[in-house]
Image (cartoon, grey):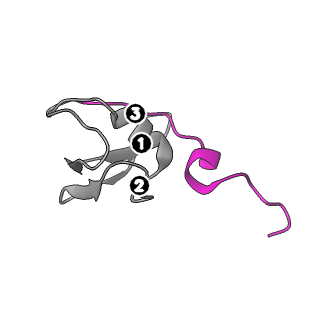
């Protein structure tokens, strides 16, 4: 089954700096309902859409992709 709307997705992840230094790694699998329900970042859902079980993906996320546009007034 490929990842599509209303698919329960289980994944493990690593977060690293551009240099490759590991920042965070999942200890247990992350599980979410795919399909625009705001259960994970939109860029992650976009990258996973249509993938089959066992697929591996590398994403380059900017701070804006994760947290939105920087608001200097904050």
Horizontal side of 40 relative to 53 (left or right) equals right
| Frontmost residue, 72 versus 31 | 31
Please tell me whether residue 65 belongs to the stretch shown in magenta. Answer: yes
Secondary structure of the residue carrying numbered label 1? helix
Horizontal side of 52 relative to 71 (left or right) equals left
Query: Residue 16: horizontal and vertical position, in percent?
Result: 42, 43
| Frontmost residue, 44 versus 4 | 4
Secondary structure of the residue carrying numbered label 3? helix
* Residue marked by disc 1: 44
In contact (CB < 8 Å): disc 1 and disc 2: yes
In contact (CB < 8 Å): disc 1 and disc 3: yes
- Residue beneath the point at 58% across and 45% down: 65
Quarter of the picture containing the C terminus is bottom right
Mark 1 vs mark 2, CA separation in Å: 7 Å
* Residue marked by disc 3: 47
Query: Residue 22: horizontal and vertical position, in percent?
Result: 37, 46
* Residue marked by disc 2: 40
- Residue beneath the point at 59% across and 41% down: 62
| Magenta extent | 56-74
């Amino acid at each position: 089954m490929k990842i599509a709307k209303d698919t329960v997705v289980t994944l493990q992840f690593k977060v690293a700096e551009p240099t490759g230094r590991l920042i965070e790694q999942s200890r247990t699998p992350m599980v979410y309902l795919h399909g625009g329900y705001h259960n994970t970042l939109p860029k992650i859902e976009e990258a996973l859409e249509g993938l089959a079980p066992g697929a591996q993906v590398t994403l380059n996320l900017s701070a804006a992709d994760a947290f939105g546009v920087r608001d200097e007034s904050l």
